[in-house]
Structure formats: structure tokens, C-alpha cells
Amino acid sequence: MKIFYRIILLVFLIIITPIHSNSAEKIEYLKTDWSFKGLFGKFDRSSLQRGYQVYTEVCSSCHSMKYLSYRNLAEKGGPEFSLEQAKAIAASFEVKDGPNADGEMFTRPGRLSDKFVMPYDNVKAAQAANGGAYPPDMSVLVKARGGGVDYIYSLLQGYEDPPTGVTLDDGVYYNKYMYGNKIKMANQLSDGLIEYSDGTNATVEQMSKDVTTFLMWAAEPHLEARHRMGFKAIIYLIILTVLVYFSMKKIWSRIETEV
């Protein structure tokens, strides 16, 4: 019986123990309560919708999200806008299409099947508009940065005046959470910068959390389904362990113990 309990305890510990990175990064990031963390974590729908608003009104002028389509905004597990809302969002953007019958390109209102509109035509245009720096695509940015959501959340709130003795080139800003502390993106957030459609107070902290939540969903759109599958797998393993235990007990009960 002790073996059975040890197996159950081992499975449980493996599941709940977080995987720590071997990175030498020791900076302490800002902490917040992420609803999607943990075995039963789920995205906060309201936060996802607000995060999309922050991305659209603040980030999308420079950063693309080339792996997302407007239809994703209405899919289960994401912001879950209604189909009509998603259609209206898509139609609010002009999409380049063509060529038409005359061989010319044209613009039309966006459709659900369209990818998010890119802010620049190409990489060179993006670099030229940003002092030589290329604003990274945000589709999987959370997964591409060490520290994940905590890093992005902290970075958006980490702008400070440089310490004494630190000099910055023109167009470079000091951020205590940025690798090397120097960043070419200016501070984009300020209290009351946008007006949330649901009436939430748009503080820097709130906007940082909402847009980071949105970026987490963009990088892991099937996170909730994966959590549900993981829970089912745990139940299956527990049941299987119990069956194996009693099967082995029955088998060994037929063998007489030598005195």
C-alpha cells in the first residue's frame, strides 16, 4: 500500500512542480496574479478583450501579429468576441488585395479570414520608421523572451531615468528590466492613455497586465484545452495506477510466501 501512495505522490509532484529555467538571469520581475497559471488556469475574457484594445490602440502602429487572423478573436478559448463583433473589427481595417481584372491592387474592408493587418509593408520600411530598430512581431513574443509574461509585464512598467554615470544615445531609453537596460522603444503607456470600452480604469499596471494576457493567448491559443487534457490525463493515470496495484496484489496473493 505504501508503494501505491508513493506513486500517486510522485505523479502529483511532477505535475505541480514548475520547470525552472537554467538562465543566469537573476532580476526580480514584478509579480501579479495571472488567471491562466496553474493546472486549472483559464484566461480572463474581459482582460483578453481589453488587451486586444491596448494592442490595437497602442502597439499595432509598430508591432505586427502576423500569425493571428480576425476570426481567432471569436474562437473558443480566446477573447471570445461575438461573431458580429469580430466581423466589425475585421471590417474596420483596410486590407490590400488583388490584382483585380485590370491587374491592379486594391484595398477592401477586412474579413474574418484575413490575417491581422501589418503596420509596415516590409522589414526595411519598419526599420526606417524606427531609427533602424525592427519592432518584433508579437504573435509569439511571450515565448521568445526569457521570463515570459512576467518579463513583458515588468518591461512595460520598467522605464526610469538612467542612473548617474549611465549615458544613452539619442532614441535610446533606460528600462531596468530590459536586457542591458537600454531599449529603443519609448515608454508607450501612461495612466488614462486609452478609454476601456468596459469602463475599467486604464492605469499603466492594468494596461500592462491586459496586453500581456492577450499576448500570452496569442502565443498559446490552446492553453485551456491543454489544461483540460492534462487534468483528464491525471485522472486516467490515477485510475490506471489503482487498477495496476490491485491487479498485482491479486497476482502475488496466489504465491505462497516461503517460511
Image (spheres, rainbow, N blue to C red):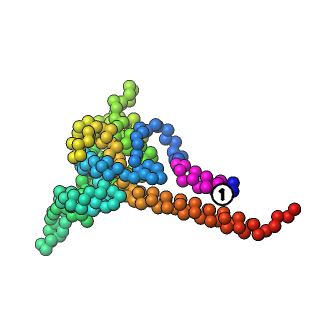
Look at the picture and state if 26 lies above or below 78.
above
Image quadrant occupied by the C terminus:
bottom right
Which residue shows up at 61% across the image and 62% down it?
241
Residue farthest to the left? 102
Q: Quadrant of the N terminus?
A: bottom right
Of 81 and 91, nearer the camera is: 81
Image x and y of residue 25, in percent:
49, 41
- Give the percent coordinates (x, y) of residue 252: 74, 66
Residue at 33% x, 30% y is 161
Q: Position of residue 228 (x, y in %)?
A: 45, 59
Q: Relative to residue 202, is residue 239 drawn left or right?
A: right
Residue at screen point 53% across, 50% down: 16
- Outermost residue toward the bottom in this view: 101
Q: Quadrant of residue 90?
A: bottom left
Is 41 or 135 nearer to us in this picture?
A: 41
Q: How many marks?
A: 1
Q: Is residue 11 magenta?
A: yes
- Neighbourhood count class around disc 1 (C-alpha, 10 Å): few under 14, some 14–19, many 20 upward: some
Depth order, front residue of 77/210: 77
Q: Residue at x 46, y 37 (%)?
A: 28
Image coords of residue 107 (percent x, y)? 15, 63
Tell me where the magenta segment starts and ends, as one range.
5-18
Q: Let me know if residue 222 is in the magenta part.
A: no
Tell me where residue 218 sits by quadrant.
bottom left
Tell me the amino acid under the disc marked 1.
Answer: Phe
Q: Is residue 118 left or right of residue 16?
A: left
Instruction: Assign a secondary structure to mark 1.
Output: helix
Examine the rendering and report whether any part of residue 135 can be seen.
no
Camera sees residue 153? yes
Residue pointed to by mark 1: 4
